[in-house]
Amino acid sequence: MNDYFGKPAGTLNGKKLFLFDMDGTIYLDDKLFDGILEVMQKIVDRGGRYVFITNNSSKSVEDYIKKINKLGIEADEENFFTSTQASIMILKEKFGDSLIYCQGTRSFIKELKKGGLNVTEKYDNTAKAVLVGFDNELTMEKLRTTCKMLTENDVEYYATNPDWVCPVDFGFVPDCGSMCFGIEKATGKKPIFIGKPQPTMINTVMKKFGFDKEETVVIGDRLYTDIASGVNARVDTVLVLCGESTLKDLEESPVKPTFTFEETKVLLHLGIF
């Protein structure tokens, strides 16, 4: 039972909590990768649990559940922890009921409000913070308002995730990190990123379900977010080469996964299950 480079991967036999990235790891757009349904079923059959920890804040958990169920995967709220949920947890603790200006999709804004944050999408100089999410409904009007908020007000600035690109069926589109880079060039302001590579999402899920570090593995396609978050949480990681990261990226990156596989379904053929 070896990985792409021939490294023995026997320690994966002891894993109970499988934390999956989504975009580029289990699907691209609305196309589920081969073997994913079997992988999920095998995890359940062995008494384990799978949870999706995604940086993609464009959809609410409710919307993700609908998408995953449509693709054939059984999942409910217990199977997700997103950068939006992490943002709610962190900002609610820090700012309470104070007003927060947010740039993001309608689904994102709805999720923030449902989570108890006091948010606005309009310019308001009473806001205490700015939060930017991955916005595939982005308009110039939104960008203008965000830049005005950051330029004219002394507010704390946060973003859900630092991902440069989001994988799609033809390649990639700009993600939250790229959007924030453009905002930085316009305002000189850099955000505090909340999602992966911070270990918050991993630690929260482990604590919630009672698993320890030795029982947990993170599986994803990005070295600088998915794998880095696992390294920061001190859990084993699996890099899959079916999304953003390439072998060249792996060679050049200071962040290294515990194991590397060509694609997620390879897990089925390693004797792990």
Image: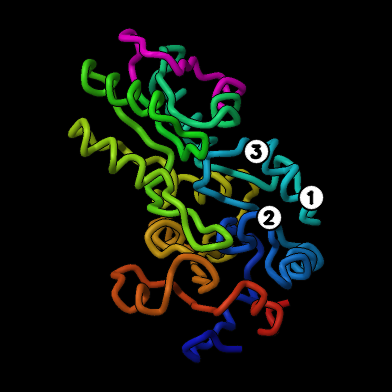
Q: How crowded is mark 1: few (under 14 residues within 10 Å), some or many (20 or more)?
A: few
Q: Give the range drawn in magenta.
A: 112-129
Q: Do the residues labelled 1 and 2 touch (CB within 8 Å)?
A: yes
Q: Which of marks 2 and 3 is nearer the N terminus?
A: 2
Question: Where does residue 232 sit, x and y in percent of width and height?
Answer: 38, 57
Give me the residue at 46% from left, 65% from top: 244
- Report, in whole angstroms, how far the alpha carbon at label 1 lies from the one at label 2: 9 Å
Q: In this view, does 43 lie to the left or right of 212?
A: right
Task: Give residue 132's quadrant in the image.
Answer: top left
Task: Give residue 23's quadrant in the image.
Answer: bottom right
Amino acid bearing label 2: Asp
Q: Which mark is residue 61?
A: 3
Taking depth in this image into account, of 11 and 223 the one nearest to the observer is 223
Give me the residue at 31% from left, 29% from top: 157
Amino acid bearing label 3: Val
Give me the residue at 36% from left, 13% from top: 123
Residue at mark 1:
70
Give me the residue at 74% from left, 64% from top: 40
- Which quarter shows the C terminus? bottom right
Considering only vertical position in the picture, is 219 above or below 57?
below
Question: Where does residue 247 sit, x and y in percent of width and height?
Answer: 41, 79
Considering only vertical position in the picture, is 8 above or below 227?
below
Q: Is residue 71 left or right of residue 192?
A: right
Q: Residue 30 carries which label?
A: 2
